[in-house]
Image (tube, rainbow, N blue to C red):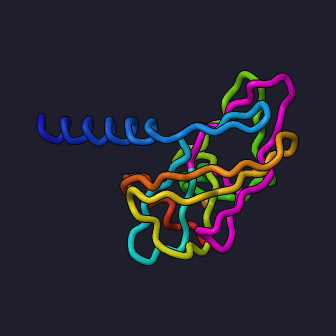
Amino acid sequence: MKHSFIAVAALIAAVLAAPASAQDYEVGDLRVDRPWAWATPGRVPNGAVYLTLTNQGAAPDRLVGASSPAAKHAGLHSHSMEGGVMKMQPVKAMEVIPGSPTVLAPGGLHIMLMGLTAPLKEGERFPVTLTFERAGSLEIEVIVEKLGAMQPSHGKHGS
Ligand SMILES: [Cu+2]
């Protein structure tokens, strides 16, 4: 009982602590914090990138596209519960509103990597280019984190 609690607490601490060591990036009024991805087991064809977008300016902006040499195709996706089932769907854009950070996280918004050119391995980094409507393009480096508990729900995703 006590042991399992400590294990869970340690896991949560590790998950929260790990992305914080990643770099932050800026383009125009926008800041991109802690881009990361889960490691992908075996030959899983898809991965997902998570990060936080902050708008430090006065005008709203939107993330309208993403690309990466790590995958054949990168797309913007959201997650939602429909009849008790977690579903993903493509979204055209993600709003980045001043004063209200847009958080991409497991179970919510994410950048989908479809057709990975190689498995994502813990500790590795790969580049992703983000395209914003106003601020333009920005290349970030995504850190691959240890596979976590949210991955199975994501594995259902079809390309
Ligand atoms: Cu997805």
Residue 69 on the magenta segment: yes
Compared with 20, 47 (above or below) is below
Q: Residue at x 57, y 52 (%)?
A: 141
Question: Quick one: quadrant of the C terminus?
Answer: bottom right
Compared with 86, 20 (above or below) is above
**Residue sitting nearer the eye, 110 or 80:** 110
Residue 151 lies, in percent from the top left, at 44, 58
Prevailing SS of the magenta stretch: strand
Quadrant assignment, res 4: top left
Residue 34 lies, in percent from the top left, at 53, 40
Residue 124 lies, in percent from the top left, at 44, 59
Q: Is residue 79 visible?
A: no
**Residue sitting nearer the eye, 124 or 65:** 124
Question: Quick one: quadrant of the N terminus?
Answer: top left
Q: Residue at x 61, y 64 (%)?
A: 113
Residue 135 lies, in percent from the top left, at 83, 40
Q: What residue span does the magenta drawing correspond to?
A: 50-79
Q: Residue at x 60, y 72 (%)?
A: 158
Residue 109 on the magenta segment: no
Q: Residue at x 84, y 31 (%)?
A: 60
